[in-house]
Amino acid sequence: MDILELSQKSSFTPTEIPLPSSKSESNRVLIIDALTEGQNKISNLAEARDTQTMIQILRSNPPIYDVLDAGTTMRFLTAYAAITNQHKVLTGTPRMCQRPIGILVEALRSVGAEIHYMNEEGYPPLAVHGLKEQTAHQIKMRGDVSSQYISAMLMIAPLLPKGLEIELEGKIGSRTYIEMTLELMKNFSIQYTWEDRIIRVPHQDYKPSNFSVESDWSGASYWFSLVACADSASLFLKGLKKNSLQGDAKIVSIMDNLGVKTTFHAGGVLLEKQAVKGLESFDFTHCPDLAQTVAVTCAIIGQNSIFTGLESLRIKETDRIYALQQELGKFNAKLEEIEPEVFQVIPSVTMPNSVQIHTYDDHRMAMAFMPLLTKTKVLIEDPQVVNKSYPSFWNHCQLTGIQTESI
């Protein structure tokens, strides 16, 4: 097993971090580009493995879409294969085939797609046999499981002859990702309405456009955490915008409470240490990918906090709630469920001389625990797992003076 040793370091001189591009924006704009037959000028696509997998599949169009461990790629390509009336098999890693897709398949079937499960009902692998005739233009979808199902349906909605009306049922999670999808569609001339729980997208054509993908706020969150946990630090994160489509830009206000001052400049943001104000509680419903980062930060800096909105973490690359509980425990911190779906971070009071982090095939576990090096030596198992979203992450750590060694 590969292990990367991160030497303890608590102070960081001013450093520029050339953040990667947003995987979320990239994967959406790639589907839109494919639906307009590549007539757009798309720049600054993400280096993330998920995005590169999407690019390769769309370019080569193989009979079997093997998405590896890319959940977004699986969901978006399922809808894409259906609306383009193709016969495709979609599969992935063993973990990918354990991640549910039934809500999306039922939505696609309800508008006329022919899709069959090849193994277990509700899970990949799938056989898609196209969508020859639209059988409905009004559907209902749960809003509390994964916004990716909703985004997949929205992106193909303009191409449906009758358009599409989606009524969202229950709690709406990751709303910002749905808004991102709609705003990206708008960039390519798609009109829509969203009133209360109903999103309506009429039948219309995508129009070719230019689009440059923004830097990734999810990737930025680990550097916010590093500044929060350090004794002293100043980092400049390149390519971030104040008015972002990405919901994870919420990290600015979260970390303002945890000791990070953020100043927007032309070309990016400057992060500097400031006094901790305190974060008594936070609801991660609309930015669940920040939960690991913030939980680890609170555990390191001594911030007792209540977290809600973590429901979707159980069906990510791993069960992230379980994974957090196990790894926080290695340096005497806790994530306790104090009542159903309400969790409390209990910070560490004693720090061991070194901590070895198991990453559970989850890129965010590796990166979220990196800031622990401000307090002790850290060993990261399977460090290459970061390739899923941020392949240059460890190189960027070295830019800050962090010493890394494969052992």
Image (cartoon, rainbow, N blue to C red):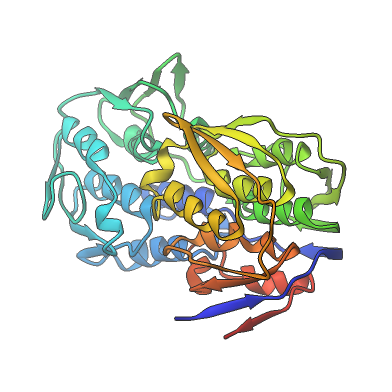
In percent of width and height, residue 349 lies at 69, 51
Image quadrant where residue 282 sits: top right
> Most extreme residue toward the top, as rendered?
196
Residue displayed at 46% across by 19% down: 194
Pick the front one: 349 or 379: 349
Residue displayed at 57% across by 86% down: 407
Pick the front one: 117 or 258: 258
Is residue 188 in view?
Answer: no
Residue displayed at 32% across by 48% down: 75
Image quadrant where residue 82 sits: top left
Q: Is residue 378 above or below residue 145?
A: below
Q: How many marks?
A: 0
- In the rendered view, does 226 fall on the left or right side of 164? right
In percent of width and height, residue 232 lies at 87, 57
Q: Is residue 140 above or below residue 319?
A: above
Residue displayed at 45% across by 60% down: 362
In percent of width and height, residue 308 lies at 52, 31
In percent of width and height, residue 72 lies at 39, 50
Locate the N terminus by quadrant. Answer: bottom left
> Most extreme residue toward the bottom, as rendered?
407
- In the rendered view, does 253 fall on the left or right side of 127? right
Is residue 4 in view?
Answer: yes
- In the rendered view, does 269 fall on the left or right side of 29? right
Q: Is residue 213 above or below residue 396?
A: above
